[in-house]
Image (tube, helix red, strand yellow):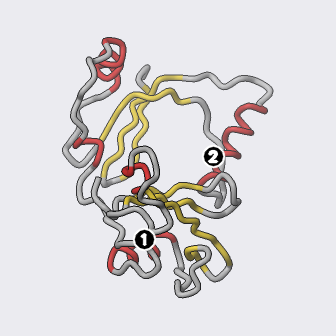
Amino acid sequence: MEPGAFVIRDSHSFRGAYGLAMKVASPPPTVHQNKKGDVNNELVRHFLIESSPKGVKLKGCPNEPYFGCLSALVYQHAITPLALPCKLLIPTTDLLEEVPEVAAPNPLAERLKQGAVQRAPADAHACNVLYINSVDMESLTGPQAVAKAISETLAATSPAAATVVHFKVSSQGITLTDNQR
């Protein structure tokens, strides 16, 4: 991974915040050069992105502006590093497609792949999934919508009848097709 490669995830320690982990070219000056162990372990820096009614910003960085959304923060830091050690490097290719297969293939995993993945147009992806339930979300999105769907499904007086469906995602949207019909 090159300096600027990064991952952002929900923070488990700070509600409503995000954790940013990024690769840097050299360890921070506070790391002693005579420290035992692999110096490469010191090439990942961690930052907290806090949310507020004003937007999102890097915590503890007074020269950082507030951004209206997380994607705006990432985009700006891909142009100029501001308080970060270097610019964020936005991937231009799917990282999963670049990973070479190094381990011996697992026969069970291969059978699952053959049974689940269907051929679809180049701009679409499809597989079989287990359809369990449908829950009205009104205007909920994200983690709140997932939590509501799980809670209502588990609280149902009669268990939902699960069925295998074909799940297809394309530029036109998402299509679910019952495999039994």
Sequence-earlier tag: 1 or 2 = 1
* Marker disc for residue 146: 2
Q: What is the x, y in percent for residue 42?
A: 43, 54
In screen coordinates, is 25 left or right of 27? left
Q: In which quadrant is the C terminus drawn?
A: top left
How busy is the neighbourhood of tag 2: few (under 14 within 10 Å), some, or many (20 plus)? few
Residue nearer the viewer, 137 or 116: 116
Residue type for callout 2: Val
Q: In what element is the residue under mark 1?
A: helix
Residue where numbered disc 1 is placed: 74
Q: Residue at x 57, y 80 (%)?
A: 61
Q: CA distance from mark 1 to mark 2?
A: 25 Å
Q: Are marks 1 and 2 in contact (CB under 8 Å)?
A: no
Picture residue at 27% right of the left edge, 29% below the top: 118
* Residue 165 to residue 91: above or below: above
Q: Is residue 75 above or below residue 38?
A: below
Q: Where does the image place residue 66, in percent across and percent down from the top left?
A: 56, 83
